[in-house]
Amino acid sequence: MSVALRPAETGMSWRTFTRAYNADRLGFLNALPAIGPVVRMGANLVFVSDPALIEAVFRGTNTDFQMTLNRRLEAVAAGRGDAALEAWMSARRRATSAVHRTATDGDATGQVELSHQIDAWTAAAAPVSVVEDLTRLNLRASVRLVAGGPDPGLETGTLALLPRLIAVVDDGTRLPGPFAMLVRRHRHARRDDQALRDHVLALADSAPGSGGIVGELAGTEVDRATIANLAVAMLLAGTLVPAAAGAWILALLAANPTWQDRSRADPEARTSVINEALRLYPPTWLISRTVAADGVYAGWSLRAGDEVVISPYVSQRDPVVFPEPERFAPERWAGLRPGIAQYFPFGAGARRCVAAELSLRRLDELVQQVLRRATRLSGGFPRSMSTTSTLFPADLRVRFAD
Ligand code: HEM
């Protein structure tokens, strides 16, 4: 019988670890594979870059590896057969088919909004900061998905909640439930979260069957709390994250003019540019799960309660799969089919992003329309990036020449 492997220890104190991590989060994580494929960073925190264990984590999600933190980083029950998890998964199934329908039918309003936005970018005399504009476009698209049409209340509610949650997530102090409420930023996040949920529930009451995911779920077996959870999750996940993806793609195109020309003419080149941008800069750069029970997983000995952390930013820089990993090289995608543990900008397994296909299609529309309407993109590559909950270019300015 083979002996179970144990995660490598960093030998760092928790204090040294948090200091080094916060000084340069991506650089810190990127250095961990050199210590070992599985590294214990703190009593319960385990960083994983071993592809076999990553695959086991994705395949075992909801059973051996659970999502036990909600958006506010509060602990949630997630045991096997847990009622809330079952309800989430059934709501998610219904929502996923509605999202697929949008992906197939297209979003005519979104296309028009995008074309107006690109015209405004090309008309601007100075380079423009695209992240905010893309955030607004994506928010409106997610509101249409959730509500079936425009809904200013959902828009303002999401815009209020998003920065509050980012502050809570970034805070790093994970206080248990009642104690969290003593911290002002937790209190404010909770208040805005409740307001947005109330708005979703009013929508569910007033318009069952009216199109949109909320209308579709209202009147089914899905309970009200789950409808609100899913709608709010989609509004939050469908706003800054896809905007960040779009911004990275535009930044990389602006810095690589030959790929502008290739992508204008060739749909495969566009797909390769998008894949490569999501490889180098996956907006959701950290994924975590909690180990349900002591055991040996893909040969590694893990303990119940361990928080397993996986980073597409790190894994997608494995030089064996992606030679010269730091280089933007869309041509590498010709014939490349990485496994689920090697390339996972949308996650994998039971909790994979509900809108992955839709998002890829939207990103393709963005590139296509930009290259059709603007002759030349230029601009310096961003010098800094935000590494709060979402990886996005912090000081990106792109010039769109008509
Ligand atoms: C380029 C765009 C996007 C990227 C890169 C992305 C990435 C991801 C990733 C990595 C996860 C899994 C997280 C984990 O395993 O812990 C996820 C989950 C999720 N995403 Fe996306 N996402 C994108 C767009 C969207 C959009 C547009 C929506 C909604 C309109 C959305 C809704 C969700 C939801 C609801 C989940 C949670 C699924 C669950 O826990 O069961 N995402 N996304």
Image (cartoon, rainbow, N blue to C red):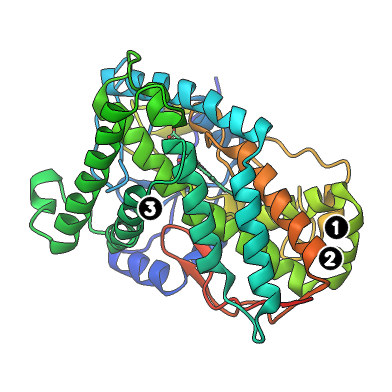
Instruction: Check disc 2 and report the residue beneath it.
Output: 260
Is 178 left, or right, of 270 in this rendering? left
**Between tags 3 and 1, which lies in front?**
3
Instruction: Check disc 1 and report the residue beneath it.
Output: 263
Q: Are marks 2 and 3 in contact (CB under 8 Å)?
A: no
Q: Is residue 255 above or below residue 84?
A: below
Q: Quadrant of the N terminus?
A: top right
Residue 399 image position (x, y, % from top left): 70, 79
Instruction: Check disc 3 and report the residue beneath it.
Output: 155
For the residue labelled by badge 1, is the local secondary structure a helix, a strand or a loop? helix
The residue type indicated by label 2 comes to Gln
Q: CA distance from mark 2 to mark 3?
A: 33 Å
Q: Earlier in the sequence, mark 2 or mark 3?
A: 3
Q: Earlier in the sequence, mark 3 or mark 1?
A: 3
Residue 327 badge = none
The residue type indicated by label 1 comes to Ser
